[in-house]
Image: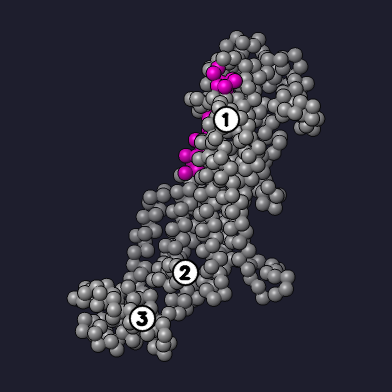
C-alpha cells in the first residue's frame, strides 16, 4: 500500500522487521516447550532468546540460493545463535511458524481497527446529539420522500459501525489460532504440548484440526468482515457526497484555509475526502473474492493462499485503517447547513405530506382507494403546475373537504411530528449498541 494511505501504526505491523520478529518469537516459544519436554537440552531456549537475531538483507541474500524464505530466515538466525540453533524448528514445518505468526499480526491489525471504530462511533455520537432536532428531507430512490431528523440519518450509520465492531471482535477471535502440528498436522514429529504451550503464551487458541495449515475459512471470515466495514464506509461517504452537491448542499466537507478545489476553477469545493473513501473501500472490497478462494486447498496443504495473503492482509488492513481515520475527520469537521435543509424541504411545495394526508382521510372514513385517488390527483397537479402548493390544491378539492376541513388540513402539514420520535430512535440505538 502506498505511504500516502498508510498510518504508521498499521504500516509497522506489516513491515518485514515485524514479520521476522514474530517468526522468531514463535520459534523461541516452541523451543521452550521442547525444552520442558526434554526434547532439547536445558538452556537452549534462553540461549536462542539472548542471541537470536536476524538481518533482513542477509536473509534476502540467502533466499536467492535456497528459494525458501523460512529456511533463509532460520539459517540467518543460526548465524547469530551458534551451536544451539540446531534445535530451532524441532519437529515443525514451515506453516506451523508462518500461520501462527500470521495470527499474531492479524490480531495486532484487528486491535488497531477496533480502536479506530471506537473513535468513529464517538465522533458520530457527538454529531447525532447535535443534529437530532435538525429536520431534513428523507429520500427514497433519490427522490424526496418524507421529512426526518438529520440525527436519525446519522444514527443509522452509527448502528452499522457498531455492528461492524461486534463482527470484527468475533473475526479477531476466529483467526486467533495457533497450529504447531508438524507435517500434514499429525503431530508425528512434535508433541501436542508444544502447540498448547505456544498458544497459551501468545493468547491464542489451538486449531483442533490443522491438517498442515490453519483452515482458511477462518481468514475468509476476517477478510469478509473488513469488506463489510468498507461497504459501510462507502455508504456514509456516498451519502455525504450526494448531500454536498450544489443543488442540495445540506452538508459540506470542511475546506481549510489555503486549500484549492480545482486547478482550473477557483470556486470549487469538492467532496474529495468522500471520494477518496469510496475509492479505498473499493480496494478493500476487491480483495474479498481472493480471500474466499483461499478456502479451497489441495488435500492437506498447498501454498496457493500464501501469495494472496501477502498482498491482501497488509493492503486490506492498511487501507481500511486509513479510511476509518479519514472518515473520523470528515464526521468531526462536517459542515451542516440547516437553512438549506429547510429550503429543500419546501422544494416540492408540500408534496412530502401526501402520506400524512392519505392516512388522515382513511381515519376520517374514506376508503384507502378513494383516499389515494384524491391525494394522488392533487399531487400530480402540484408536479405539473407550480403556481400553487400541494396544500392549496388539496384545500380546493371538494371530495377531500367532505372528510377534512381546511383548518384540520393545516394541522396535517406540521413538521413537528416528523421529529417527535427522534429521541426514541436515537436512544434505542445507543442502548442497543452500548
Res. 412 image quadrant: bottom left
Find the magenta span and give its range: 167-187
- Taking the image as shown, residue 284 lies to the left or right of residue 70, namely left
Q: Which residue is mark 2?
A: 142
Q: Is residue 353 above or below residue 87?
A: below
- For mark 3, what is the residue? 379
Q: Was residue 176 drawn as part of the magenta stretch in this picture?
A: yes
Whether tag 3 and tag 1 are in contact, CB under 8 A, the answer is: no
- What is the secondary structure assignment of the residue under circle 2? loop
**Badge 3: how crowded within 10 Å, few (<14), some, or many (20+)?**
many
Q: Earlier in the sequence, mark 3 or mark 1?
A: 1
> Which element type, helix, strand or loop, lies under badge 1?
loop
Q: Residue at x 52, y 53 (%)?
A: 231
- In this view, 144 is above or below 112: below
Q: Position of residue 155 (x, y in %)?
A: 44, 58
Q: Residue at x 44, y 58 (%)?
A: 156
Q: How many marks?
A: 3
- Calculate the distance from the C-alpha at mark 2 to the C-alpha at mark 3: 18 Å
Residue projecting furthest to the left:
365
Give residue 104's quadrant in the image. top right
Q: Which residue is mark 1?
A: 298
Q: Nearer the viewer, mark 3 or mark 1?
A: 1
Q: Which mark is residue 320?
A: none
Q: How is the image coloured?
A: one colour
Give the distance between the C-alpha atoms of the residues marked 3 and 1, in whole angstroms: 64 Å
Nearer mark to the viewer, of 1 and 2: 1
Asked if residue 246 lies in the magenta stretch, the reply is: no
Q: Is residue 411 left or right of residue 251?
A: left
Nearest to N terminus: mark 2 or mark 3: 2
Q: Residue at x 42, y 85 (%)?
A: 384
N-terminal of the two: label 1 or label 2? 2
Amino acid at each position: 500500500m502506498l505511504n500516502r494511505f498508510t498510518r504508521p501504526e498499521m504500516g509497522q505491523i506489516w513491515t518485514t522487521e515485524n514479520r521476522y520478529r514474530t517468526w522468531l518469537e514463535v520459534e523461541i516459544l516452541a523451543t521452550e516447550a521442547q525444552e520442558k519436554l526434554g526434547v532439547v537440552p536445558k538452556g537452549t531456549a534462553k540461549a536462542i532468546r539472548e542471541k537470536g537475531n536476524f538481518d533482513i538483507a542477509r536473509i534476502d541474500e540467502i533466499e536467492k540460493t535456497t528459494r525458501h524464505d523460512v529456511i533463509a530466515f532460520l539459517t540467518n538466525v543460526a548465524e547469530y545463535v551458534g551451536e544451539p540453533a540446531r534445535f530451532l524448528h524441532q519437529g515443525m514445518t514451515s506453516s506451523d511458524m508462518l500461520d501462527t505468526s500470521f495470527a499474531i499480526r492479524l490480531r495486532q491489525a484487528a486491535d488497531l481497527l477496533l480502536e479506530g471504530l471506537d473513535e468513529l462511533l464517538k465522533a458520530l455520537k457527538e454529531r447525532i446529539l447535535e443534529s437530532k432536532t435538525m429536520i431534513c428531507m428523507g429520500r427514497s430512490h433519490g427522490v424526496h420522500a418524507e421529512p426526518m431528523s438529520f440525527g436519525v440519518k446519522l444514527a443509522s450509520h452509527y448502528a452499522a459501525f457498531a455492528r461492524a465492531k461486534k463482527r470484527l471482535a468475533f473475526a479477531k477471535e476466529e483467526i486467533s489460532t495457533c497450529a504447531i502440528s508438524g507435517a500434514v498436522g499429525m503431530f508425528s514429529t512434535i508433541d501436542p504440548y508444544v502447540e498448547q504451550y505456544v498458544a497459551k503464551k501468545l493468547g491464542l487458541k489451538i486449531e483442533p484440526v490443522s491438517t498442515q495449515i490453519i483452515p482458511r475459512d477462518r481468514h475468509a471470515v476476517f477478510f469478509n468482515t473488513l469488506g463489510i466495514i468498507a461497504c459501510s464506509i462507502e455508504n456514509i461517504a456516498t451519502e455525504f457526497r450526494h448531500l454536498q452537491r450544489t443543488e442540495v448542499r445540506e452538508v459540506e466537507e470542511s475546506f481549510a484555509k489555503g486549500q484549492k478545489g480545482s486547478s482550473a476553477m477557483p470556486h470549487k469545493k469538492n467532496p474529495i475526502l468522500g471520494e477518496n473513501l469510496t475509492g479505498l473501500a473499493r480496494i478493500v472490497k476487491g480483495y474479498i473474492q481472493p480471500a474466499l478462494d483461499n478456502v479451497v486447498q489441495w488435500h492437506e496443504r498447498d501454498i496457493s493462499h500464501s501469495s494472496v495473503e501477502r498482498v491482501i492482509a497488509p493492503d486490506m488492513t492498511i487501507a481500511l485503517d486509513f479510511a476509518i481515520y479519514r472518515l473520523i475527520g470528515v464526521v468531526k469537521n462536517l459542515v451542516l447547513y440547516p437553512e438549506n435543509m429547510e429550503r429543500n424541504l419546501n422544494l416540492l411545495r408540500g408534496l412530502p405530506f401526501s402520506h400524512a394526508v392519505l392516512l388522515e382521510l382513511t381515519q376520517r372514513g374514506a376508503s384507502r382507494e378513494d383516499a389515494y385517488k384524491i391525494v394522488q390527483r392533487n399531487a400530480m397537479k402540484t408536479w405539473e403546475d407550480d403556481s400553487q402548493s400541494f396544500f392549496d390544491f388539496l384545500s380546493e378539492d371538494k371530495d377531500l373537504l367532505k372528510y377534512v376541513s381546511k383548518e384540520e388540513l393545516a394541522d396535517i402539514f406540521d413538521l413537528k411530528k416528523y421529529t417527535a420520535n427522534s429521541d426514541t430512535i436515537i436512544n434505542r440505538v445507543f442502548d442497543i449498541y452500548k
